[in-house]
Image (tube, coloured by chain):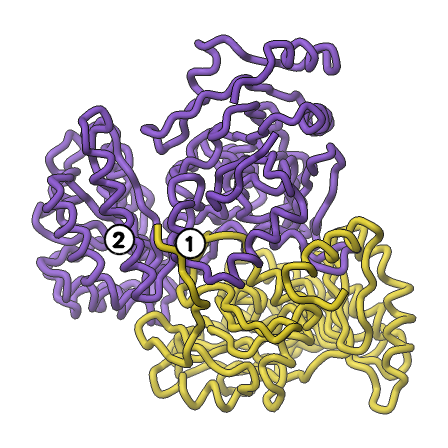
Chain colours: A purple, B yellow
Amino acid sequence: MVIPTTLRDRLLRKIPNIQALDSPAQLAGYDADGLGYKRFAPDLVVIPSDAAELARVVAFLHRERVPICLRGAGTSLSGGPVAAQGGVIIHTSRLRAISKICPEGLWCEVECGVNLNQLDVALRPSGLCYPPDPSSGPVCTIGGNVASNAGGAHCFRYGVTSNYVLGVEVVMLDGSIRRFGGPAGGRGAWREDWKRLMIGSEGTLGAFTRFWLRLTPRAEKAWTFRATYSGLPATERAIHALVKHASFPVAIELMDPRSVAMVENSAMAVGLPKDHFLIVAEIDGPAELVDRRAEAVARVLRDAGSADVLFGDDSEMRAKLFKARKAQGGLLGQVSPDFLVQDAVIPKRALADLLGLIYAEAERAGIPAVTVMHAGDGNLHPNFLFDSRKPGDLEKVETISKRLMRRVLDVGGTLSGEHGIGNDKSLYMGMVFGPSSLRMQLAVPQVFNPAHQFNPLKVFPERRFAA
Amino acid sequence: MKELDHERFFEPFIDEVDGVACVPAFYADADITRIASPLGWRFPLILDAEAPLSAQVAASFSAPSSSRFGPYCDNIVGMNWELPDRRRVRVGERVVKSTTGYDIFRFLLATDGRFGRATEYVLRLRPACDGGGIVFFDGPQDSLESAAAELMHSCYIHWLESMDWLTTGPKSGRLRFGIHCPQDEWPLFLMHLDGIAKGRGLLTTVTTGNGQVFDGLPDLVLKTTPDRVISLARETAEYPGVRSIALCAPAVVHVYLPSGAEAATIVKGMVGALADSLYSLGGGWQSRRLECPLFGADEAEWIKSLAKEWGLAA
């Protein structure tokens, strides 16, 4: 969509000091998210200085009838915070205040542009923490986390973002500001719990400006474990036993041999056998409890068939044991011009079936695939490495993705566990919802954003903005 | 992309590997235990041993074991739902994590039956252990409160099945802890709690078991912040004959009225007195005795818009 060149001028007349970017060089950084090969140039980027200004911008853009897309750090992996139908991106990078930390009440109030590491540093002196920990933690914003209901390695026990959002402040399409919930995490005066629809809505219902988050005491001590397995059956035995173990692991992470080989063939090598599966697990809690449990967890890993189990309880050891898993994500961008990360959640007994399909399809198409998994949750991340400049590569990856998602649904899984649908998986939504449930889903944006002016073409392909 | 031309539903199942089970909404604790226990799993969020699960979910957001596992909406992951016009749909998933579409599942779960009813739930089960018990603290009220505050801010709170303040009068109460753990860890929990009690001159009473408590379905549920939950429970206990239980970590007060009371009238009076202070913190209330009113024209308009598609009566 090409918007009138006078829009910027009219906006500046209305809100004189607003930061507005429209030169090609300025806009270049906003045309994609972590799904780098799908690019959509916005017509204008606006950076409000606070929530009140953001509300005025939304009200102005609503009247001007242009598509509006909210964006935090842009680390989404599903094509969420991009201007898929052109229009204006509102960048929330200046809303970075941690307004209040209430240790007695175990909550904090933050603006949407606060990033996870910033919050973690601020919370340390209180002995409290905010547990969700997506891999992009050093840069991703809470706003993006809430919009996509982000997870992370430690959510197997601690839960995902929605488990920690007590309240949401939302700028509605007309520029009015609504609060759903608050420090107490209830409905407030509303009869219905509207924040449930807001969390994970991927910027399609309103613009988030502020959150109230639940905090929890930091674990006193953690033990981290690393085990390698020569085959999938032994790996599955280990995962199944850990999931049911009374130590309630906080994280159970899996890397397939191809991921391990990718790390070992890089400068990040940590000395793992390249043809083995790798499990990294962690338990945490009061020292006297976890110290007693550590040997039992190691025994589970050994009994499942690993002759190579390492574990430790200090931060240096933890960093060493997690090194391969953490290196994997960063390496993708170094070894391949493009990559696509899928985010299916599957019943864990279907792991062999799904890995078999991924390997077979990728091999047939000549597309390298490496897979990691938040194994406790069954959250599978196959990464397909390709070159979008090479004719046919992208089509091959999309064909594999479609077949994979079909099988995921057939075995009782779901399309996305923590990345959201964005415009990457929106075309698969018709396979998920039957006629009645699809109507129910589409009724939600109909309530708050009926013309789909907020973040069009995301979540459902039907969501096209008709100016 | 081929569109799905029919609705998908959950069929009754139990998945021993994932620890999830689809059960009828009328199942009670014994029914769930019967299918989960032989496989080493349990569903801990039980308020009342006899009541159907649907009645428990409608009665409160939380149960005592929400202290460890969170509210119902984090322990039920999907359901088959019958709309008022008798259409049936599936909402949520059979896996424990999903960001596929709008979270209609959690929204509906909290609607107290206004948009239809659940016919089956998919439960997230938890590993069953062979030990545990219930511990009570009694003694000076300020010492009890300081013990509660210390535990709320230690990572032991993640491992206590429940930590509840039971009112014994308008100005008095006692603390109750539920613990569900492997037999060999039970002495560690006892030692830790004993240390906290002794340092404050509190009396402890211990009974062994599995840590499960059944308080029954509350008449009124109040949601606040953890630092205000005990004082709120005390405030409600000032009403004649009223007994209250503060679930400390979830920050929920369960209010139980005396039998034979004019429930709706008492609830209305309590809500009238407490609502504003609850709302100011983004808290709230729910009651199986009294329907919550709509909040202004906006909410009425949003409901009307949903009603068109969701089969609600106008």
Q: Which chain's residue wears label 1? A: A
Q: Amino acid at mark 1?
A: Gly
Query: What residue sits 55% from the left and 37% below the top?
Result: A143
Q: Is residue A227 above or below residue A363?
A: below
The residue singled out by tag 1 in the image is A430
The residue singled out by tag 2 in the image is A404
Q: Is residue A297 above or below residue A385?
A: below
> Is residue A354 rendered to the left or right of residue A264?
right
Residue B94 shows in the view: yes
Q: Residue A390 at what x, y percent from top left? A: 18, 26
Query: What residue sits 20% from the left and 68% below the top?
Result: A237
Q: Residue A376 at what x, y percent from top left? A: 33, 60
Q: Quadrant of the C terminus of chain A?
A: top right
Q: Residue A375 at what x, y percent from top left? A: 30, 58
- Measured Cα–Cα span from mark 2 to mark 1: 15 Å
Query: What residue sits 20% from the left and 28% below the top?
Result: A387
